[in-house]
Image: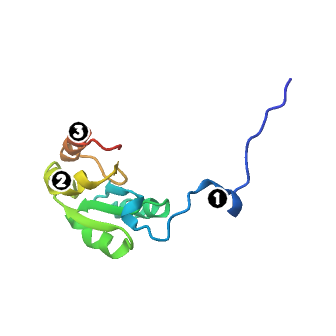
Amino acid sequence: MARPVWTAERTTRALVRRLLPVRSRWAHKGDFGKVLLLCGSKGLAGAAMLAARAALRTGSGLVYLGVPESIWAIEAAKCAGAMPFPLPEAEGRLCLASLDAMHDKLAGCDVIALGPGLGRGKETERLVHALLWQARQPM
């Protein structure tokens, strides 16, 4: 019986330097992608915060964080580096009315992350379906 071939490689600073592109000293954060995060709901504010941190730590340039109005103050205080903005809500969750409110941000982003802590409800479901039909960015 043949032995398996392992391809694991130890993560070292040298490996990371080799894999990650060098950023120009004159670059600005808008050069590294614009992400629109639509997440969080009443009781699940931590999910939105963690998603924003992950987007920033993995190299995203501008991170917009659309959250229900009721948790916006929490996100604004906790999310250094991301730009939280309040969106209309129904029962503490994002709703279809949020689509109109995020129109400008949606058009200017390269990618959309939808879901961490979004919660479940009819209005949220309508928003997700509308986004899946209208958004042209990877989601």
Frontmost of labels 1 and 2 is: 1
Q: Residue 103 shows which numbered tag? A: 2
Q: Residue 95 shows which numbered tag? A: none
- How crowded pointer 2 is (Cα within 10 Å; few <14, some 14-19, many 20+) is rated as few
Frontmost of labels 2 and 3 is: 2
Of residues 50 and 28, which is closer to you in this image?
28
Q: What residue sits right under mark 1 in the picture?
A: 16
Q: Residue 129 shows which numbered tag? A: 3
Q: Earlier in the sequence, mark 2 or mark 3?
A: 2
Location of the N terminus by quadrant is: top right
Residue at 36% x, 67% y: name it: 82
**Residue lying at the far top of the rendered structure:** 1
Q: Measuring from the top left, give residue 71's x and y in whole percent.
A: 26, 67
> How far separated are the C-alphas under marks 3 and 1?
38 Å
Q: Secondary structure at mark 1?
A: helix
- Amino acid tagged 3: His
